[in-house]
């Protein structure tokens, strides 16, 4: 199990239910392979620096997770196939960074 961070940019023309459904499908695919979803930060609508697929803004979601590379590949496949997703990026976090984040969140209590 490795720590990852994923950013997903959804089309703002899609309604909230379809965005939530696409996000849930991706996270369910991750959980089905034993992945653990940490925090899901919904940043909301942001304006792009340049057009993506003829769009000027998107709805950003940042997800912290721990999973195997297989589970992450399944989640990515779901995001690639979803029409609501404009872009997504998965980054593997270094173990030092992931440990610091875990320590910071557990110490906040």
Image (spheres, rainbow, N blue to C red):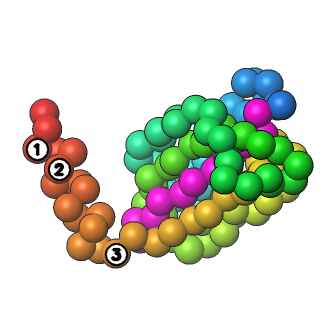
Crowding at mark 1 (Cα within 10 Å: few <14, some 14-19, many 20+): few
Q: In which quarter of the image is the N terminus?
A: bottom left
Q: Is the magenta stretch mostly helix, strand or loop?
A: strand
Which of the labelled discs sits on residue 70, or is there none?
none
Residue hosting label 2 = 104
For residue 23, above or below residue 93: above
Which of the labelled discs sits on residue 94, or is there none?
3
For residue 70, above or below residue 84: below
Extent of the magenta region: 1-12
Which of the labelled discs sits on residue 107, or is there none?
1
Disc 2 is placed on an element classified as helix
- In the figure, residue 84 lies in which quadrant? top right
Looking at the image, which residue is at 66% across and 69% down?
Answer: 73
For residue 74, above or below residue 94: above
**Nearer the N terminus, badge 2 or badge 3?**
3
Query: Relative to 99, is 23 on the left or the right?
Result: right
Residue extending farthest front: 49
Q: Is residue 3 magenta?
A: yes
Could one spot residue 28 in this view of the protein? no
Looking at the image, which residue is at 17% across and 50% down?
Answer: 104
- In the figure, residue 58 lies in which quadrant? top right
Say whether marks 1 and 2 touch (CB < 8 Å).
yes
Disc 1 is placed on an element classified as helix
Q: Determine the CA span between mark 2 and mark 3.
A: 16 Å
Disc 3 is placed on an element classified as loop
């Amino acid at each position: 199990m490795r720590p990852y961070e994923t950013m997903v940019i959804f089309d703002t023309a899609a309604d909230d239910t379809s965005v939530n459904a696409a996000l849930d499908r991706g996270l369910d695919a991750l959980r089905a392979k034993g992945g653990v979803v940490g925090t899901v930060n919904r940043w909301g609508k942001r304006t792009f620096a340049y057009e993506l697929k003829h769009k000027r803004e998107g709805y950003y979601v940042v997800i912290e997770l721990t999973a195997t590379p297989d589970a992450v590949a399944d989640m990515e496949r779901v995001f690639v196939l979803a029409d609501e997703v404009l872009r997504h990026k998965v980054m593997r976090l270094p173990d030092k960074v992931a440990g610091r984040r875990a320590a910071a969140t557990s110490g906040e209590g």
